[in-house]
Amino acid sequence: MNSKMVTSMTQELIERFHYAMLGIYDAARKLKKPYTPRRFLNMVNDYGGKEAVNGN
């Protein structure tokens, strides 16, 4: 496997993870009030899913 292929695969995995994090947001929105996951969504949108988890 060459480095270009690995980079492409890594980028795809990061993107898939980001969208999975947005799916978590959608599931959290359905939780009983008063919980609202706005801060979570802001972090994912601002930093991306991976960096939000890394604690950016």
Image (cartoon, rainbow, N blue to C red):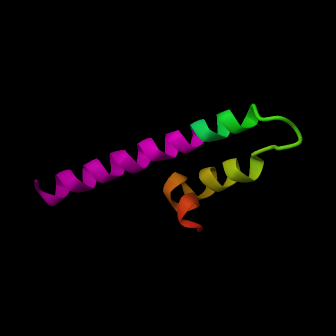
In the picture, measured across the screen, residue 7 lies left or right of residue 28, that is: left
Residue 46 rendering spot, x and y as whole percentages: 62, 56
Q: At x 61% / y 52%, what residue is drawn? A: 44
6 relative position to 32: left or right: left
Task: Choose top left, top right, bottom left or bottom right for residue 26.
Answer: top right
Query: In the rendering, at what x and y percent does residue 48 appear?
Result: 54, 54
Q: Residue at x 76, y 47 (%)?
A: 38
Observer-nearest residue: 34 or 47?
A: 34
Q: Where is residue 9 in the image (x, y as percent from the top left)?
A: 27, 48
Q: Above or below — where is 9 with respect to 55?
A: above
Which residue is most to the left? Answer: 1
How many numbered marks appear? 0
Q: Does the magenta stretch include residue 15?
A: yes
Range of magenta residues? 1-22
Q: Is residue 32 above or below residue 4?
A: above
Q: Determine the residue positioned at 62% across, 50% down.
A: 45
Secondary structure mostly taken by the magenta-highlighted segment of the chain: helix
Residue 8 lies in the magenta stretch: yes
**Rendering quarter of residue 27:** top right
Specify the farthest residue to the right.
Answer: 34
Question: Which residue is located at x 74 percent, y 35 percent?
Answer: 29
Q: Which residue lies furthest to the front in this view?
A: 32
The quarter of the image holding the C terminus is bottom right
The x and y percentages for residue 47 are 57, 59
Name the residue furthest bottom: 56
Q: Is residue 4 left or right of residue 25?
A: left
- Lateral position of residue 6 relative to residue 36, left or right: left
